[in-house]
Image (spheres, grey):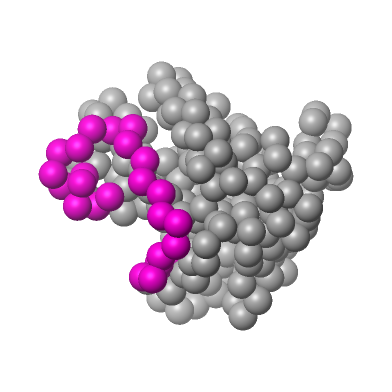
Amino acid sequence: MLALARSGIEEGVWLRAERQNGGRGRQGRAWASPVGNLYTSTLVRLRASDPQAATLALVTAVALEEVVRAYLPPRHSRESENDVGKSQLQLKWPNDLLLDGAKLSGILLEGAGNAVVIGIGVNLAHHPTDLDRPAASLAAHGVTPDPADFLDTLAEAFALWLARWRGEGLAPIRARWLERAHAPGTALTARLPDGSATDGLFAGLDSDGALILRLADGTTRVIHAADVFLI
């Protein structure tokens, strides 16, 4: 998709692999890619009036959460704001979707000229067991969607949220993300690019989509780039 982006291909194209032998995640991590999961990429051609490109991760996350929620049994779905404490499906900053606290999917943004390539991996049929954090799959929860069918639904949801991002700005995307995220006050560790780590309580997102942590001394810190873990 990066090569296609540089060749001028139009926005809205999706590519899906049945398997990958060179899959990778954030910071170049290897990504195991057995048949049965979703491995897909699309691209967005940036316009001068668009919100910040990095916030496409939030757009993708809310679209993905919406689709996964539709596939899951009712106990995992948040049907109303009153069900916040019961939901087992949660977004985690910057780019993860958690199921029962375990990683179900990931999102990776990469620039190519005036385009942003969005890579998405979802554990539909399989999940790894050798990571530094727990992982989950839909199959382990009794749901086995076909990757091609799942992608068709995801492409539709993404197009709708992308249109809102362009037409209304980041605010409705941010609001939806916060509705579907872990609760305010959740304890988090942010591992920063310089190797340091910061512990704090989830205090929302700022107006640009950056993570806000409330520290032990009562102050807040805005995090723009980090690996984030639930404590």
Residue 136 % position (x, y): 69, 62
Q: Which quadrant: the C terminus?
A: bottom right
Q: Is residue 213 visible?
A: no
Q: Is residue 209 left or right of residue 21?
A: right
Q: Based on the picture, tell me whether residue 49 belongs to the magenta stretch.
A: no
Q: Nearer the viewer, residue 128 or 87?
A: 128
Residue 161 % position (x, y): 49, 28
Residue plotted at (52% across, 62% down): 35
Q: Is residue 107 above or below residue 226?
A: above
Which residue range is magenta in the image? 1-26
Residue plotted at (63% across, 64% down): 126
* Residue furthest top in the image: 167
Residue plotted at (78% across, 55% down): 141
Q: Is residue 197 visible?
A: yes
Residue 212 % position (x, y): 57, 52
Residue 121 % position (x, y): 50, 56
* Residue 168 picture quarter: top left
